[in-house]
Amino acid sequence: MTPDFAYRIQRIRFDENYAPSDSTRITTNFANLARGASRQENLRKTLRMIDNRFNSLAHWDNPKGDRYAVEIDIISVEMQVAAGASDAAFPLIEMLKPTIIDQHTGERIDGIVGNNFSSYVRDYDFSVVLPAHNQDAATFSLPADFGELHGRLFQHFIRSAAYQQQFSKLPVICISASTSKTYLRTDNHHPILGVEYQQSELSSTDQYFEKMGMRVRYFMPPNSVAPLAFYFIGDLLGDYTNLELVGTIATMEAFQRIYRPEIYNANSAAGKVYQPSLKHQDYSLTQIVYDREERSQLAVKQGKYAEEHFIKPYKHVLEQWAARHAI
């Protein structure tokens, strides 16, 4: 008998009173901000940044730049390997879901689920599997099946009744451009997403998201200084409204300005040929406390957690399931 998976989706409001749950990856962008003595001020400033950026992009019929506010929910997905089984659920994925509040009309407008993407299995792949594969190698390479299990799990989830009952559109993940690739500015320009860039070749992250059924396009929004990577299924420009896209940009650009100020809070904008660098010196810091070194160290611990609590205990079950859920 082949196994089936059951999903449980929980929503947690990301506001100034947010505290990470026990199952949240502590390296996750939003969770990292909610720690330490500055936690509440960090959260308050981040949310203000998101609101301000949203209003600057959604400037039509918005003369004072205060028409919209953004509420953000953390979408936390737990997976049980067999529906009805007594085994504890494993924390599979966390994403963000903005809701846009039109303060002139009182209307609440759904944003796009996705934005940030957090996954213990991805930590396992990038912080355990990949270093082990390249430990004694002369040149860097990816394992032949790298990301396939994770990709199958993600695609199974977004096709599930649990996902489709709560979300009407497919997710869009928005993250930083790769520091190992070069990006070329094109003549394509979108009124919200901005000018499009194309990369020289796919990064390992791009290839990983391909296993999840997602393609990537790079856009530098108006008044931004570097392109963002948008991973999507379907038609990024056609499937979503302007306000939905603004919600994603405002949310993730704020996080990137905090976490990668060398790139996204630089004092000069990307040129026609652009390679992001965390060694760039001409940038400004936000007034938000963030420990990037701690975050990278914890990713290894979280990858080993996934190995111990999910990959090894369910190895045969996962192999059996994956055999009938080919990408």
Image: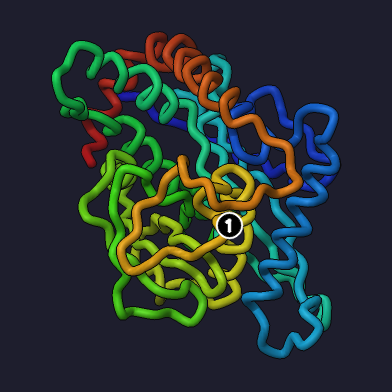
- For residue 1, say whether it is visible: no
Give the percent coordinates (x, y) of residue 268: 51, 63
Give the percent coordinates (x, y) of residue 208: 31, 40
Quadrant location of the C terminus? Answer: top left
Which residue is at the front of the view, 85 or 78? 78
Which residue is at the front of the view, 32 or 265? 265
- For residue 39, say whether it is visible: yes
**Residue wearing tag 1:** 253
The residue most toward the front is: 281
Give the percent coordinates (x, y) of residue 104: 83, 82
Q: Residue at x 52, y 46 (%)?
A: 281
Q: Amino acid at mark 1?
A: Glu
Residue at disc 1, secondary structure: helix
Q: With respect to residue 206, does 35 lie above or below?
A: above
Q: With respect to residue 96, does 204 lie above or below?
A: above
Which residue is at the front of the view, 285 or 126? 285
